Every structure is written in C-alpha cells, then in structure tokens.
Amino acid sequence: GAGVSQTPSNKVTEKGKYVELRCDPISGHTALYWYRQSLGQGPEFLIYFQGTGAADDSGLPNDRFFAVRPEGSVSTLKIQRTERGDSAVYLCASSGTVGAGNEQFFGPGTRLTVL
Amino acid sequence: AQSVTQPDIHITVSEGASLELRCNYSYGATPYLFWYVQSPGQGLQLLLKYFSGDTLVQGIKGFEAEFKRSQSSFNLRKPSVHWSDAAEYFCAVGSGTYKYIFGTGTRLKVLA
C-alpha cells in the first residue's frame, strides 16, 4: 500500500515569504507527526496530531510555525515570514495508534531552502 | 532529560566486513529503542525496535541490535556489510507516549 507522501519534495523560497508543506499519511493512521531535520542532525519533534487536534505542539520553535489537520488525514505545516534558519528537511510520519512503542512510518520529507 | 548519543559521525568499512554502530541513551524508565536507516532522498526506514523481552533484536536486511541496560546502550550490528548498506543510521528512543528522540546519526561508507 501507499506510504506517507509529502509535497513538494523541494521548496525554495525567499526570506520573509510564507510556505505550506503538505503531508498525506498512511490511510487509516490516526496519529501524525512532524519533525524537522537540520543539516548534520537527527530529526527533531515539532508537533503531534491525534485525529484532528494537535495533542502536543511543544516542539514548534515559535509562533511563525503552525500546523493543521482539519479532517484528521492530510496535514499542512505552515511557516510565516520564513527565515534562513528555517532551512531544513521537514519530515512527516504517521502511526496507526499512539504510543512510543508504535512504529512511526516516515515520508521522504520536504527540503526547504530559504534564500 | 532524555537524550540519544551516537558517538561516531562517520564510519567506513570494507564490503564484507562486520559493522557495529554505537548508540547510548539517557532515559528514566524502560525505553523503547529504534534504529532507522536513511538513504539519500528517502524517508527513514525502520530497521528494528526493542520494547521488552529478549535483549537481542533481529531486524531487516540482516541487522541486529543488543539492548544493554547496564551500559544504556543499543548498538547496531551486521556480520557482513554490503555496498547497498551505505546510508545514514539513526538511533532513537521513544519518549513519553509518542515522541521520538533521535541521535545525530552515523554516516556509513562502504568500500568496494
């Protein structure tokens, strides 16, 4: 079956612009996660959704970052007034149920470059 | 605070040689531990996971890992490396109910 998909695969934008990154989780997965992977680092947790609601957004770096999942499936990560430091690969993952022991399936990521 | 340390940033091995990638974690309770592999342009793929029970865990692609509570380690091993194993490897610990905390990764290079 289809895995987690993310679009676009690459996004180049200018400092100060607004961007949206999309994640399509595995069908039927109720939990969805966003991570950010900076160059030379491991992925860092941003936000977690259970269904439509953001259960934990403690990893979002500041209020320029926002994510939604209005119908409990597709999620969009939104970044306002982008800064060069936002350049990273943004990874989305989903799992069938919540729990640290439940495997998270990762998408290929969106590489964001802010010029 | 929970953390994961992968002390080796880069490792180079010859094809056919054995491999061990180190992972140390800091976590207050019994951890859920994972190894993921990331190839260029690909998402993270789960190699294996440890929740409880047998401390030697078998995974895909011939990998195994051993959980050692006394050493807070979860090292990844493979007896004979193939050129296709060249990739970046991440160790992670499941924190709380859903967060994964990742190490900084180890990039594996395989010499023909």
Image: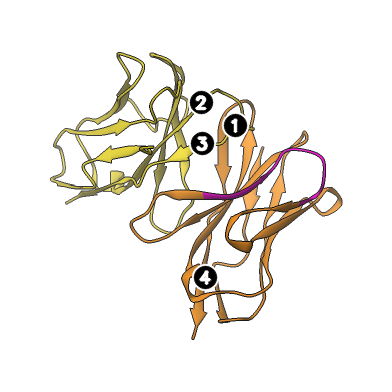
Chain colours: A yellow, B orange
Residue at numbered disc 4: B108
- Which sits earlier in the primary sequence, circle 2 or circle 3? 2
Spatial CA span between label 2 and label 3: 8 Å
Using the numbered discs, state the Cα–Cα distance from disc 1 to disc 2 in whole angstroms. 8 Å
Residue B13 disc label: none
Q: Is residue A56 left or right of residue B41?
A: right
Mark 1 residue type: Asn
Q: Mark 4 falls on what kind of element?
A: strand
Tell me: B93 left or right of A91.
right
**Does B43 appear above or below B40?**
above
Task: Return the residue nearer the eye: A28 or B4.
Answer: A28
Circles 4 and 1: CB atoms closer than 8 Å: no
Callout 2: chain: A
Q: Which residue sits furthest bottom?
A: B112
Crowding at label 4, few (<14), some or many (≥20) Cα neighbours within 10 Å?
Answer: many
What secondary structure is marked by label 1?
A: loop
The amino acid marked with disc number 3 is Gln
Q: Is residue B14 above or below residue B38?
A: below
For the record, the magenta segment spans B46-56
- Tell me whether the residue at label 1 lies in contact with that at label 2, contact meaning CB atoms closer than 8 angstroms: yes
Q: Secondary structure at mark 2?
A: loop
Asked if badge 3 and badge 4 are on a common chain, one would say no
Marks counted in the figure total 4
x%, y% of residue A69?
32, 19
- Which-is-in-front pick, marks 3 and 4? 3
Residue annotated with mark 3: A104
Q: Residues within 10 Å of mark 3 (few under 14, many from 20)?
A: many
The amino acid beneath tag 4 is Leu
